[in-house]
Amino acid sequence: MNLAMPEIPVQSGIDKEIATQPPINQTLSEVPLRVKGFLAFAAVVIYAVLLTTFTFNKKAELVAEFEHLQDLYKVEDGLRQVDATAFHIVMAVFMNSKTADHRIVIQRFLENFELLKRKNTDLSMQYPIAGVNLAGVENAVLRAAAHPSAEGLAAMNSELLKVKIEITQHIDEATREQKASAESFHMLWDSAALASLLFGLIGLLLLGAIIGLFFTRLTNDLHTLKARALGIIKGERNTLTPVTRNDEVGELMHAVNQMASALDERENELVIARQKFFHREKMAAVGALAAGVAHEIGNPIAAMSGVLQEMVDEQESGQFNGAGSNKLSVLQTQIQRLSAITREISGFAAPQPIERQLLDLNGLVRTTAGLMGYDKRMNRVSLRLDLDSQLPAIYGVADQLTQVIMNLLINAADALGFKVVGEREIILHTGFSADNVSLSVTDNGGGMDQETLNRAFEAFFTTKSKGNGLGLSLCYSIINGHGGTIEIDSAPNQGTTVRLSLPLPTDDGGDTL
């Protein structure tokens, strides 16, 4: 069942003060979260650019080394073609060395030599360092052509063998460079991979550390704010949260501190206003009791007036004797009765301390029930007290609990006002268990239907022609504030019982709130 809590309007300047308070002074050290996010994004972009630049540089080095290795393979291939041609020429000369016509051999040599020259020229044009010197072979060919002889052929073959040896040396050198270039390529590849890996890991570690520190601090501050908010809900509003940041979270901390201070001030004003309201309600009840009290006081005054008049008459007639002492005793009794009534009213009307203290619930019940006996609504109502004499003390505010008892008695009396047949009775019963003290107020009135029972604790809900509908709502608020419970058991034509339960003090001397 949703129970609406009463709201008491309190005029306060807190809202205006907060609304007109200047914002937090901007300082050079303030870095808003939005700016921090932009800086973090810029750092990530710079890191990505640096990593990309490094990767492309390493890629360029690898591509250059790979192209160099390809050139070495092409040089080797060209040299092997030149070497094959030279070998073919040497073998041709060797095979035709026994031929008698040396001119024919020289002519064939020249045809093959032209092929060798073209391949050497093509190789030299692409790779200048790979070409071989054929000048010695050309000179030997010219001499042999001028004077064909076996010696000329041998000289040509000898020069050609020198060229072949040079080609072989170039091939060996190209092979060594290929091996060195391949090793260099693998080293560059390994270093690039390792550097990229280290670069990436270092960047990720730095970025992770920065993000971790940022969110760790942010999470801690948010947990602090959460704990502070829960503390404010529990009423802990005196301790301010230290503002350790200069960004939006710091502004939130400052706002929470302002809210705590404002709520503390508002609650103090609300407590004062509520006490004033309780006292006004109580004084209204005192006003309702005034007629009954005046009647009760009128009887002793009339008796006292008659006794005094008789004593005056006896004194004037000289008949004042021992019987006068009995009249004085009657007069004293009536005066004591008047004093008791005035003390009850004075004690009820006087403001009580708002701090919780040890209270005798039975005493509060007796006092309130005694005063309510003077209310005209209690005429022809049997008010019976069934109080546990061993009832332990409780912690509470006497004024508030008196207000609860009075409201419940007024409600019970109003319920009995519609009863036509039978005895009108209200029973107040107290008792206790291991951890709480209970009070029940039972009447044998008309009771309540389920719809009325469901709305009984709603503020401003009432079934009376006169009333503000705050009685049971205030009772709920007071009992709930004392850490207790309040329940209603009622049915049409079956009467109503309101049960209160209040916690006992704990072993350390404090209450259970």
Image: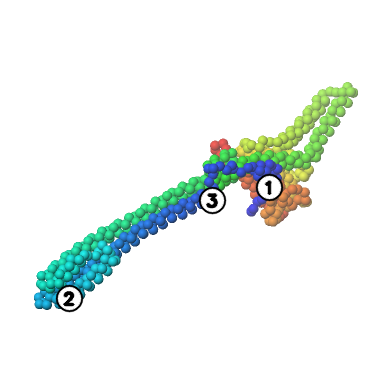
**Could you tell me the amino acid type at mark 3?**
Arg
Q: In the rendered image, is residue 464 in sight?
A: yes
Frontmost residue, 286 versus 237: 237
Q: In the rendered image, is residue 444 in sight?
A: no
Q: Secondary structure at mark 1?
A: loop
Say which of marks 3 and 2 sits in front. 2
Frontmost residue, 159 versus 45: 159
Quick check: marks 3 and 2 in contact, CB under 8 Å?
no
> What residue is shown at x 14% (from left), y 73% (from top)?
93
Q: Secondary structure at mark 3?
A: helix
Q: Is residue 311 above or below residue 366?
A: above
Q: Disc 3 and disc 2: Cα gap in Å?
A: 89 Å
> What residue is shown at x 57% (from left), y 46% (from top)?
252
Q: Is residue 433 left or right of residue 9?
A: left
Q: Is residue 99 above or below residue 498?
A: below
| Quadrant where the C terminus is found in the figure | top right
**Could you tell me the amino acid type at mark 1?**
Pro
> What residue is shown at x 63% (from left), y 39% (from top)?
396
Q: Earlier in the sequence, mark 3 or mark 2?
A: 3
* Position of residue 114 measured from the top left corner of the image (x, y, whole percent): 22, 72
Q: Is residue 270 above or below residue 79?
A: above
Q: What's the mark number on residue 6?
A: 1
Q: Earlier in the sequence, mark 1 or mark 2?
A: 1
Most extreme residue toward the right is 317
